[in-house]
């Protein structure tokens, strides 16, 4: 069945981790005239359930995940109390030990947030995204198993989305995402922290017309995040 081209923006989300999946799902639900394409280097069927990295989520994040229908059925631990303290020698007053305790009970909420493994959250989010994408394949797309090699901002011109439709009006800048083939989007969100690591395989981020000018404007490479 043929579908009319969408008048709204076409969003590229690079990275199908917790942030990328939640963003793609949120836009899919709340922006019905937007197209969304989700990219990730890992295959769609890759098993991430054993990833042991621990995530501590705020209450707002917990509420959002539940609204999206992406809350894990098991493997979560509620945060009921948060203690913030300052130890010597940072404390100036003799014998002082500043401390703040925040309790869910005192605030009248069931929890302050939750702790879970990365491998618990991502499968739940991905299942919710796949279900949404299956319901609306004409405007929601994913490219698992296709690492993004480059992101380039180019002058405005009618683009072409993954199904051949125009991606929007001319007159503004667009982002070209290269992942096996070049696709044009009105907006791209890089939700993959590994993109900024010191790695020879990281994508080229060319934000100006001239590569040399882009390198000069970008300045030194960002520092690697502590592990």
Image (cartoon, rainbow, N blue to C red):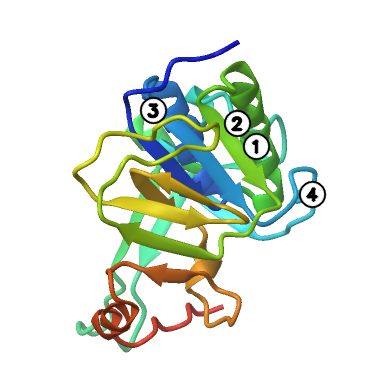
Pointer 4 or 1: first along the chain: 4
Q: Secondary structure at mark 2?
A: helix
Q: Is residue 63 visible in this depiction of the protein?
A: no
Residue 189's spot in the image, x, y percent? 40, 51
Q: CA distance from mark 1 to mark 2?
A: 5 Å
Q: Secondary structure at mark 3?
A: loop
Q: Which residue is mark 1?
A: 126
Q: Which residue is mark 2?
A: 129
Say if mark 4 contacts mark 1, CB within 8 Å: no
Foreground of the two, 101 or 111: 111
**Quadrant of the drawing holding the C terminus:** bottom right
Quadrant of the rendered image containing residue 52 = bottom right
Q: Which residue is mark 3?
A: 34
**Quadrant of the drawing holding the N terminus:** top right
- Residue at the image point whose x is 58% and y is 48% from the top: 39
Say if mark 3 contacts mark 2, CB within 8 Å: no
Residue 26's spot in the image, x, y percent? 44, 31
Q: Which residue is mark 4?
A: 46
Say if mark 3 contacts mark 4, CB within 8 Å: no
Say if mark 1 contacts mark 2, CB within 8 Å: yes
Q: Residues within 10 Å of mark 3 (few under 14, many from 20)?
A: some
Pointer 2 or 4: first along the chain: 4
Pointer 3 or 4: first along the chain: 3
């Amino acid at each position: 069945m043929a579908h009319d081209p969408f008048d709204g923006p076409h969003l590229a989300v690079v990275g199908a981790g917790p942030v990328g999946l939640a963003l793609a799902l949120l836009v899919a639900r709340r922006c019905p005239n937007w197209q969304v394409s989700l990219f990730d280097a890992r295959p769609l069927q890759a098993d991430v359930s054993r990833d042991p990295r621990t995530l501590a989520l705020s209450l707002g994040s917990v509420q959002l995940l539940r609204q999206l229908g992406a809350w894990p059925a098991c493997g979560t631990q509620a945060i009921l109390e948060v203690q913030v303290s300052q130890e010597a020698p940072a404390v100036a007053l003799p014998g002082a030990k500043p401390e703040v305790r925040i309790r869910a009970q005192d605030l009248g909420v069931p929890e302050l947030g939750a702790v879970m493994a990365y491998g618990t959250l991502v499968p739940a989010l991905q299942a919710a995204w796949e279900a949404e994408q299956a319901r609306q394949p004409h405007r929601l797309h994913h490219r698992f198993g296709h690492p993004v090699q480059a992101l380039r901002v180019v002058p405005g011109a009618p683009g072409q989305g993954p199904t051949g439709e125009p991606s929007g009006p001319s007159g503004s800048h667009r982002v070209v995402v290269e992942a096996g083939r070049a696709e044009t989007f009105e907006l791209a969100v890089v939700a993959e922290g590994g993109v900024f690591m010191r790695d020879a395989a990281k994508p080229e981020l060319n934000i100006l017309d001239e590569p040399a000018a882009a390198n000069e404007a970008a300045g030194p490479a960002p520092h690697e995040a502590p592990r």
